[in-house]
Image: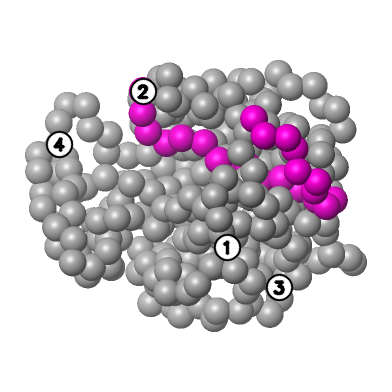
């Protein structure tokens, strides 16, 4: 296993000046907490402000309340939304766009990163941003509806980029089962004897990618971007790297074995990015952040 240093000395991109702040919404979610822990280690990263409905956060605000006074922020990263529930519950992912835009205008953001999901693609291998989405579940359908609403937004001086996020180690549905003293992790075993294969990204890598994207000129950002490590990993490998036992069950006819993303675009945009590529490296990165306090 390659051991990555806790602080990288070289910036991912050459630039002559620091970017404006990044404002993160939904910062008290599982993903937001990991990003808060990773952010202080990023060399030359934009300053970050963390917004949430409840403390701890730099800014406490809920949709429906009067907009807070915000300092200037060049980038807004919309982490908020729902990942489970029925179609009515998941419709919040599109409804929150009104509040995202209001915050973006209030802080003068030039770019907004909207977090979507690999779930919009449905099953498939090496899926590219140009491939037609075909979600099979309510969550993927809700994220696709959100994407379609974003594409219909008037520019109004803001660059909107949809980030189709791979599974984030420590923040996805598998994360609770990776903790010590939990019951064995249940995985589907498919006809070829293998378990699920997915695109993943280490949480520290996600933080570094967001920081690097935030300092790119807005006009160079793509409309849609897969955010993933270059190679997929097996869920079995992640569970074993976390030293957790596995309970195997026969995969149902509805179970999806492979959802993997093509990383060509993000690796071309961030050519200096050094990725955690294996399950062991990703678990190492996640555990390092999980041991820290936020902020």
Q: Quadrant of the C terminus?
A: bottom right
Q: Where is mark 1, residue-wise?
A: 36
Q: Closer to the N terminus: mark 1 or mark 3?
A: 1
In the image, taking residue 270 as reference, residue 172 lies left or right, namely: left
Based on the displayed image, in which of its 4 quarters is residue 152 positioned?
top right
- Residue behind mark 4: 251
**Label 1 – label 3 distance at C-alpha:** 14 Å
Indicate which disc, 2 or 1, sits on the residue closer to the N terminus: 1
SS assignment at label 2: loop
Mark 3: which secondary structure?
A: loop
The correct choice, above or below, for 53 with respect to 184 in the image is above
Q: Quick one: label 4 or label 2, which is nearer the N terminus?
A: 2
User: To which residue does mark 3 refer?
Assistant: 43
Closer mark to the observer between disc 4 and disc 3: 3
Q: Is 185 displayed left or right of 162 in the figure?
A: left
Q: State the image coordinates of residue 290 (x, y, percent, origin top left).
A: 42, 69
Q: Is residue 179 visible?
A: yes
Q: Is residue 67 magenta?
A: yes
Please report whichever mark, 3 or 2, sits nearer to the chain's N-terminal start. 3
Residue at the (27%, 64%) spot, across then down: 179
Where is mark 2, residue-wise? 86
Residue at image x 61%, y 79%? Answer: 7
Residue range of the region highlighted in magenta in the rendering: 64-86
- Crowding at dot 3, Cα within 10 Å, few <14 / some 14-19 / many 20+, comes out as some
Residue at (82% x, 26% y) in the render: 155
């Amino acid at each position: 296993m390659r051991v990555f240093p806790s602080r990288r000395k070289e910036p991912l991109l050459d630039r002559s000046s620091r970017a404006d702040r990044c404002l993160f919404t939904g910062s008290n979610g599982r993903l937001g907490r990991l990003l808060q822990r990773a952010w202080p280690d990023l060399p030359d990263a934009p300053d970050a402000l963390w917004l949430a409905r409840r403390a701890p956060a730099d800014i406490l605000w809920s949709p429906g309340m009067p907009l807070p006074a915000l300092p200037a922020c060049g980038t807004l990263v919309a982490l908020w939304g729902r990942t489970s529930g029925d179609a009515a519950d998941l419709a919040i992912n599109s409804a929150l766009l009104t509040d995202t835009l209001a915050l973006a205008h209030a802080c003068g953001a030039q770019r907004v990163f909207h977090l979507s999901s690999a779930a919009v693609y449905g099953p498939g291998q090496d899926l590219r941003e140009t491939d037609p989405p075909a979600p099979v579940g309510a969550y993927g359908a809700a994220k696709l509806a959100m994407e379609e609403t974003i594409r219909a937004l008037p520019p109004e001086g803001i660059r909107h980029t949809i980030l189709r996020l791979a599974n984030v180690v420590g923040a996805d549905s598998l994360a609770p089962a990776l903790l010590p003293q939990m019951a064995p992790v249940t995985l589907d075993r498919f006809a070829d004897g293998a378990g699920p294969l997915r695109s993943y990204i280490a949480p520290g890598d996600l933080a570094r990618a967001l920081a690097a994207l935030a300092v790119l000129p807005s006009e160079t950002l793509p409309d849609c971007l897969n955010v993933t490590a270059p190679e997929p990993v097996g869920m079995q490998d992640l569970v074993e790297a976390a030293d957790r036992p596995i309970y195997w069950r026969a995969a149902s006819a509805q179970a999806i074995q492979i959802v993997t993303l093509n990383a060509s675009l993000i690796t071309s945009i961030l050519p200096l990015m050094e990725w955690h590529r294996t399950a062991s490296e990703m678990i190492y990165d996640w555990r390092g952040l999980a041991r820290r306090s936020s902020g």
